[in-house]
Image (cartoon, helix red, strand yellow):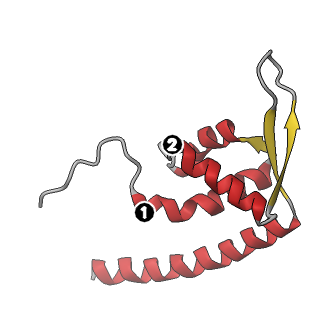
């Protein structure tokens, strides 16, 4: 069986999980964009496109799932935009947890059938 070399690009199949991954990270603690990019490695998303992550953060803020504040940098650099999950975002995350659980059951069924 031949496989294609995908190089360092993150497979597209991880993109649908970007939204819940960001919500989980922000549920754990408020954070800023670059740190969120780094922390996505916990979900094997370390090579996720930065512009995609920032667009997702902007979208979540527009939908009022998260809120942001500007925080002065500890160094001489510009202020950081700190994102925090709010109650609406927690509800969306709970919805994701239910949806992922249902998908997991379907995937488990597929794996069991494939191993027969």
Name the residue that disc number 2 marks: 46
Give the crowd class for mark 1: few <14, some 14-19, many >=20 residues within 10 Å.
few
Residue at 56% across, 46% down: 51
* Depicted 69 relative to depicted 17: above or below: above
Residue at 82% across, 24% down: 73
Q: Nearer the viewer, residue 27 or 12?
A: 12
The image shows residue 78 at horizontal and vertical percentages of 78, 25
The image shows residue 93 at horizontal and vertical percentages of 73, 68
The image shows residue 38 at horizontal and vertical percentages of 60, 38
Q: Residue furthest left?
A: 1
Which image quarter holds the C terminus?
Answer: bottom left
| 1 or 2: tag closer to the N-terminus | 1
Q: Mark number for residue 99?
A: none
Q: Nearer the viewer, residue 78 or 9?
A: 78
Residue at 52% across, 65% down: 16
Q: Secondary structure at mark 1?
A: helix
Q: Is residue 15 left or right of residue 99?
A: left
Name the residue that disc number 1 marks: 13
* Depicted 10 relative to depicted 34: above or below: below
* Depicted 6 relative to depicted 104: above or below: above
């Amino acid at each position: 069986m031949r496989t294609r070399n995908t190089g360092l690009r993150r497979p597209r199949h991880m993109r649908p999980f970007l939204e819940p991954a960001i919500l989980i990270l922000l549920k754990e603690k408020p954070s800023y964009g670059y740190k969120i990019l780094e922390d996505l490695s916990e979900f094997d998303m370390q090579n996720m496109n930065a512009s995609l992550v920032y667009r997702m953060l902007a979208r979540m803020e527009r939908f009022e799932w998260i809120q942001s504040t500007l925080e002065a940098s500890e160094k001489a650099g510009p202020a950081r935009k700190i994102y925090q999950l709010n109650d609406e975002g927690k509800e969306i995350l709970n919805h994701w947890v239910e949806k992922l659980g249902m998908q997991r059951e379907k995937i488990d069924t597929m794996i069991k059938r494939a191993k027969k």
